[in-house]
Each structure stands twice: as C-alpha cells, then as structure tokens.
C-alpha cells in the first residue's frame, strides 16, 4: 500500500493567526487521508493547532518544538 500524500507548508516568520489560517486553507484543498506537515515559529501555534485538530476532527500525529521551530503533522478527515 502506498504512503498517503503529504503536503509541506512552511509558515515560519508568520504570527497568529496566519499559520493556522494558511493550514486551514491548505487542508480545504486536500483529500481525506492526506497529510499536512506544517513548520512554524509562532509559539502560540502549539495551542492553536492542538485545539483546531480536535475541533475540526483531524488527527494531529506530531506536535513538537525543535530549536524554536514548531512542527505539526495532521491527517485530514472529512467531517461526518
């Protein structure tokens, strides 16, 4: 079975709410099951992406900070 398609979104240097808005726009153009990898430098993005994934029904597979860069890996799900 092939790995799911993964899209990379670099929003480093953007402040709240832009990282999340750009991620939402990107997810809207994706199919269910595809992955979105996001890298950001806004410290507030950790809370934003965690809450967004839970509320929107997407899986947040990764959420970590490494040397001031916040990394997220989401799997898109269709809303029931």
Image (tube, rainbow, N blue to C red):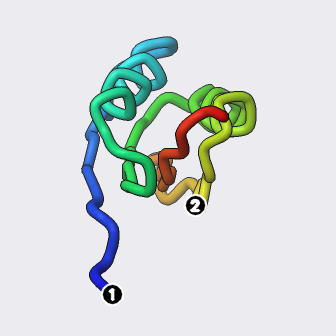
Mark before the other along the chain sequence, 1 or 2:
1
Indicate the position of residue 73 as horizontal and vertical percent values: 48, 55
Instruction: Determine whether the residue tagged by mark 2 lies in a helix, strand or loop.
Output: strand
The quadrant of the rendering that contains the N terminus is bottom left
Write down the residue under mark 2: 62
Tell which of 10 and 36 is nearer to you: 36
Residue at position x 66%, y 34% in the image: 80
Left or right? Give the position of 42 relative to 63.
left
Q: In x, y percent, where is residue 75?
A: 50, 53
Question: In percent of the image, x 62 and y 52: which residue is there?
Answer: 59
Label 2 neighbour load within 10 Å: few <14, some 14-19, many 20+:
some
Dividing the picture into quarters, in which one does residue 31 lie? top left
Mark 1 and 2 residues: CB-CB less than 8 Å, in contact? no
Q: Is 46 placed above or below 19 here?
A: below
Q: Nearer the viewer, residue 25 or 67?
A: 25
- Residue occupying the far top of the picture: 17
Residue that sits furthest to the front in the current view: 80
Instruction: State the residue position of label 1.
Output: 1
């Amino acid at each position: 079975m092939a790995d799911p398609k993964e899209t990379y979104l670099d929003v480093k240097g953007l402040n709240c709410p832009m990282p999340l808005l750009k991620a939402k726009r990107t997810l809207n153009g994706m199919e269910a099951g595809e992955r979105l990898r996001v890298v950001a430098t806004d410290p507030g993005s950790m809370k934003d992406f965690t809450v967004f994934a839970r509320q929107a029904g997407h899986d947040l597979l990764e959420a970590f900070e490494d040397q001031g860069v916040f990394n997220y890996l989401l799997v898109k799900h269709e809303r029931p």
